[in-house]
Amino acid sequence: SDSGKLKVLTQMLAAIHERGPSERVVVVSNYTQTLNILQEVCQRCGYPYTRLDGSTPVSQRQQIVDSFNSKFCPAFIFLLSSKAGGVGLNLVGASNLILYDIDWNP
């Protein structure tokens, strides 16, 4: 998981974080395995995060989104599965969006 792409993502997150507390990031991936790696990055870097993926109960998803959109939410990063959050999510609390996935070769 020390790919060049992951190193660049870590640098991007650090640069965004340095801009101040109003900056927040949604990181979208197609795969929960990738979200697991990104969650480890958040933990290692000390970034507060929230996560929504296919294992998140449907009944809790809107509450998670509403919490992230609040200016009082401490989360810097919202880890989002594209399959779980593909339709109807309004993430106005984010100022940055990163689409991230591991390298893929056919």
Image (cartoon, rainbow, N blue to C red):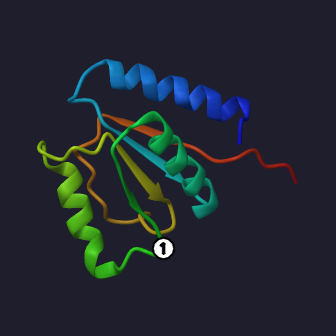
Label 1: few (<14), some (14–19) or many (≥20) C-alpha neighbours in 10 Å: some
In depth, the one of 36 and 54 nearer the eye is 36
Residue beneath disc 1: 54
Kind of residue sitting beneath label 1: Gly
Q: Nearer the viewer, residue 25 or 10?
A: 10
* Quadrant location of the C terminus in the rendered image: bottom right
Q: Residue at x 71, y 35 (%)?
A: 2
Q: Position of residue 21 (x, y in %)?
A: 22, 28
Residue 8 at what x, y percent from top left? 60, 26
Left or right of residue 104, residue 81 in this image? left
Residue 59 in the image: above or below residue 24 = below
Residue shown at the point (34%, 19%) measured from the top left: 18
Provide residue 6's location: percent of width, then percent of height.
64, 35
Q: Position of residue 86 (x, y in %)?
A: 44, 63
Q: Closer to the camera, 20 or 106?
A: 20
Identify which residue is drawn at 48% across, 73% down: 54
Q: Quadrant of the N terminus?
A: top right
Q: Is residue 31 left or right of residue 55?
A: right
As drawn, 60 above or below 22: below
